[in-house]
């Protein structure tokens, strides 16, 4: 089964160009190790939150922007082999290709797709989501997504991915579970919705919020801890 490796980072806003160069170089290096696809996004409409949010997830400073990224691997076993094996490519070596951000605050983890609608298109605009869901409600979440995600497609979205956490390391400063204050009996879902552009996203979300079909379905998770934001793709493979 395809494995998705998700990342959230806090990058000094002044380092945007350096981040794009670094991310593009790393992705190119991983392509030689089996990487199928990758998307690196720069935060554009990322709200602050009191309880949870993308900025809180990575302890972003006022002069930092949040980035959201995902790498697609053929399987979890391929990802594990790459992460454990020797990586002699200088593009993948932090000493020869230093990160233009604080690596200690990077949130990362592995997810398995549970629902995909539509297909990726070049460019566009992405809404990213991270939410905690009780493990025994996995099927309820999938059924909820099957019922509600087509509404997003009807209102202009082109691609939706819902992915369930399978390997979310605990970090010293940040991690996916802390990002949404996940409880011991909860797992983390990582999702995105692609739109043709920012205006289509804004108009589509406005129509969705007024669509009575969405309100007819009870959310199988605590929406108060859902984190979300709008992102522009800056590296795509």
Image: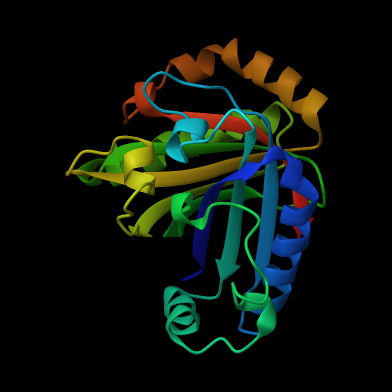
Q: Residue at x 51, y 37 (%)?
A: 129
Direction from residue 43 to residue 214 in the image, left or right = left
Q: Residue at x 45, y 32 (%)?
A: 56
| Placement of 157 over or under 107, stated as above or below | above
Observer-nearest residue: 17 or 74? Answer: 17
Q: Is residue 64 left or right of residue 134?
A: right
Tell which residue pokes out farthest to the left in this image.
184
As drawn, the residue found furthest toward the front would be 95
Residue 58 drawn above or below residue 85 = above
Residue at x 59%, y 30% (from the top left corner): 229
Residue 52 shown left or right of residue 17 in the figure: left
Report x, y in % for residue 156: 74, 30
Q: Position of residue 123 (x, y in %)?
A: 82, 47
Along the line of sight, the residue nearer the viewer: 137 or 171: 171
Q: Quadrant of residue 168?
A: bottom left
**Total numbered circles:** 0
Residue 198 in view in this figure: yes
| Nearest the eye: 231 or 193 | 231
Q: Is residue 237 visible?
A: no
Q: Position of residue 103 (x, y in %)?
A: 51, 57
Image coloring type: rainbow
Residue 61 % position (x, y)? 55, 32
Tell me if residue 143 comes above or below residue 219 in the rendering: below
In the image, is 79 to the left or to the right of 164? right
Which quarter of the figure has residue 237?
A: bottom right
Of 145 and 131, nearer the camera is: 131
């Amino acid at each position: 089964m395809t494995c998705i490796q998700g990342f959230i980072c806090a990058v000094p806003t002044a380092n945007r160009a350096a981040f794009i160069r670094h991310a593009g170089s790393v992705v190119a290096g991983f392509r030689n190790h089996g990487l199928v696809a990758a998307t690196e996004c720069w935060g554009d409409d990322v709200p602050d939150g009191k309880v949870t949010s993308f900025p809180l997830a990575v302890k972003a400073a006022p002069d930092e922007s949040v980035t959201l990224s995902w790498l697609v691997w053929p399987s979890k076993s391929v990802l594990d082999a790459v992460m454990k094996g020797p990586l002699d490519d200088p593009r993948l070596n932090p000493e020869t290709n230093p990160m233009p951000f604080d690596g200690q605050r990077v949130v990362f983890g592995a997810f398995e797709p549970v629902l995909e609608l539509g297909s990726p298109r070049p460019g566009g605009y992405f809404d990213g989501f991270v939410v905690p869901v009780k493990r025994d409600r996995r099927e309820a979440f999938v059924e909820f997504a099957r019922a509600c995600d087509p509404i997003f497609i009807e209102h202009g979205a082109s691609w939706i991915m819902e992915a369930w956490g399978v390997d979310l390391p605990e970090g010293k400063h940040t991690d996916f579970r802390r990002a949404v204050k996940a409880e011991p009996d909860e797992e983390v879902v990582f999702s995105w919705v692609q739109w043709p552009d920012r205006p289509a996203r804004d108009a589509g979300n406005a129509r969705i919020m007024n669509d009575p079909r969405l309100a007819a379905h009870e959310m199988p998770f605590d929406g108060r801890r859902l984190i979300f934001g709008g992102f522009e793709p800056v590296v795509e493979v």
